[in-house]
Amino acid sequence: MSHDHDHHHDHDHTHFPDDDLPEGSVVDGAALTKDIEEAFDFIVVGSGAAGAVAAHTLAKAGHSVAIVEEGPWVKTREFGERVYEAFRRMYRDSGTQVLEGHSYIPLIQGRCVGGSTVMNSAIAHRTPEDVLAEWDENFGLGAHVSAKALEPHFDALEQELNVHAVNDDVLGENNRLFLDEARKESLPARKMHRYERNCRGSGRCVTGCPSAAKQGMNVSYVPWALALGARIFASCRVERVIIEGGRATGVLARGSHDVRLRARRGVIVAASTIQTPNILARSGLRSRAIGEHFQCHPGFGVGGVFDNPVTMGFGATQGAECIALRRTEKIKLETISMAPELAAVRIPGIGHELMQRMGSFANLAVWAVVVRAEAEGTVRPGWGGRDRVKLSLTPRDMEHTRKGTAILARMMFEAGAREVWPGIYGLPGVLTSVDQVKLIEQAPADSRLFSMITTHLFGAARMGVDPRTSVVGPDFQAHEARGLWVVDSSVFPTNLGVNPQHSIMGMSRLAATRIAQAASRGSSAAA
Amino acid sequence: MTLSNLETRWAEAALGAIFPGSKDAGMAGIRGMDVRGFLSEVLGAVPFQAALGLRIAIWLVALAPLFIIGRFKTISGLTQPDRERVVAALVGHRSYALRSLTLILKTMGALLWAGDDAVRAHMLAPAPAPAPKNELIPLRVKRAAVA
């Protein structure tokens, strides 16, 4: 594709934010020749949406900050097109992580500097006000985490990361088809709002943006924090937070050697919904709420073959959405352009039948339903130091999935698709008329029949006022240890029904601002 | 974890059944690609449980001819059409475990096959427009009755 040639060409001349980092600011844990012991004001565990924002906020307030990241720093210049290479280098467990339950659902997480923001589609949604009201009513968060408290942080994030609707020149046909059809059906849909500067529509969000247009943490808050004097220890897995006398005093991490970092003021854990609860458990916290109330947003994609080229290889990977059914049907409808490798898994059939369908790839559109699932699961330490995540979707979750799938299939036919590939076991692999959509509506609401995937993760170190049922208080501090804050989506009392990155960053910025203010007050008092 | 030569041959046969390529579409089959090298790399990169799952999937497909089509042969001993029949039956099997394990193989194969430059180029090229659905309706001319 000519677009890719453009990127390679530009690589030679363009300066990327992760090209020239301050000398000594990046420590490669995989290349250590001896143990390290250093001290900072704050240690931040994780460099994804939550960790990067917290580190930047604290560094900006004048504190010395160390970020500890389990994965490597894969630079923009190293990003390729192939999904397997991205899986191997940047995804947790090389992309093989799953939710275990009634069915096995692939669970996608980044494991690199920038975390999942390196391979997500950079979609920004403020935390819905009805969700915040739910958190207030059921978990007593009140003014601590309210729309008013979050607003200045969302404003700042949107400005700093250049949030705006997808530009027309990179909308791409997959997104345009969705928007046109939604408009015809009077379904409120819109272009997605994303963190990006000069997106070229390479359609390669999932393997890392080749032009650093996507404002992932790897090209924004992490380099910005380093420019303010922070340091990052990449390829260092945090074994535990050191807690002495009821207070967090540092972390013990391992690269090729031990990395022992002392925290003069505290430790901020932002290792993600899956890793945070297990780090807390390994650190000696005993709350019965650790690892409980895990939630997610499972997603299910539907393919449609059109007479004209759709060319998913060009355009915003995800550029159009409808959230009008979020409260009533618990679903969000959206587009998602698939890389050939991922489409080859999802396209029905094998052998010559599959080959024939793959020949239609250029004319394939993929739209998806994302469900605000009511199911709750658990996160526990697994065998061999891994994480074990269990969750079984409820029949109601599957009814919502099925309903969204039927809506999308109908929309595709109405938009002119000559075939729709529902990907539901027991149904024909190919539907050829809108009349057949009723087969989807009649399919059993059983997760074993749907090939789902999940990326949005919540809970497992829940926030609340009651230490018996929550892990951290409304001030983000662990009930069991002073100077230990958790600022990622593991503290979310519930899931959201919209993409979580903005909420994660907003909550993290809110928490870090308060932590920095408290630290300044402490310094003033001491002086 | 590494695969034996026998397991590699089974994997090549199974993946060849899923991704045989297409002369019509100008897409190469997976058999011409480095299946052995790719699987070795995957098995070295993924966690033990995932590697074990892949290995079980290979054994499942290898021995499936016996219980799917009643032939006392492994997958590599079958003809291409029979291999496709066996793998198709597993992908569509009523047992969730069997079809999920087979899907592991399809996933691995997809990462290799569709990651190939030539295959990607063909997939990303616009397909020719299909023939119109409605055939021309033959005109019937009625002669007007001449008074």
Image (tube, helix red, strand yellow):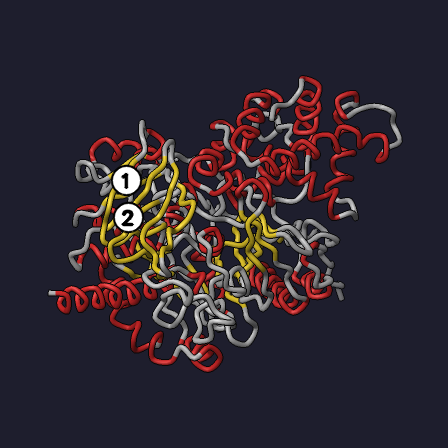
Query: Which amino acid is tagged 2?
Result: Arg
Q: Residue furthest left?
A: A527
Query: Foreground: A308 or B72?
Result: B72
Position of the C terminus of chain B, as image quadrant, is bottom right
Query: Foreground: A363 or A230?
Result: A230
Question: In this image, A492 relative to B110: left or right?
Answer: left
- Let me know if residue A419 appears in the view: no
Q: What is the CA distance from the residue labelled 2 to the residue labelled 1?
A: 8 Å
Q: Position of residue A360 (x, y in %)?
A: 57, 41
Query: Foreground: B7 or A23?
Result: A23
In the image, residue A371 sits, relative to residue A30, either above or below, namely below
Question: In this image, A427 relative to A198: left or right?
Answer: right
* Residue that mark 2 sits on: A262
In the image, residue A142 sits, relative to residue A357, either above or below, namely below
* Residue that mark 1 sits on: A37
| Label 1 Cα neighbours within 10 Å, binned few <14 / some 14-19 / many ≥20 | few
Q: Position of residue A169 (x, y in %)?
A: 32, 52
Position of the N terminus of chain B, as image quadrant, is top right
Q: Position of residue A496 (x, y in %)?
A: 47, 68
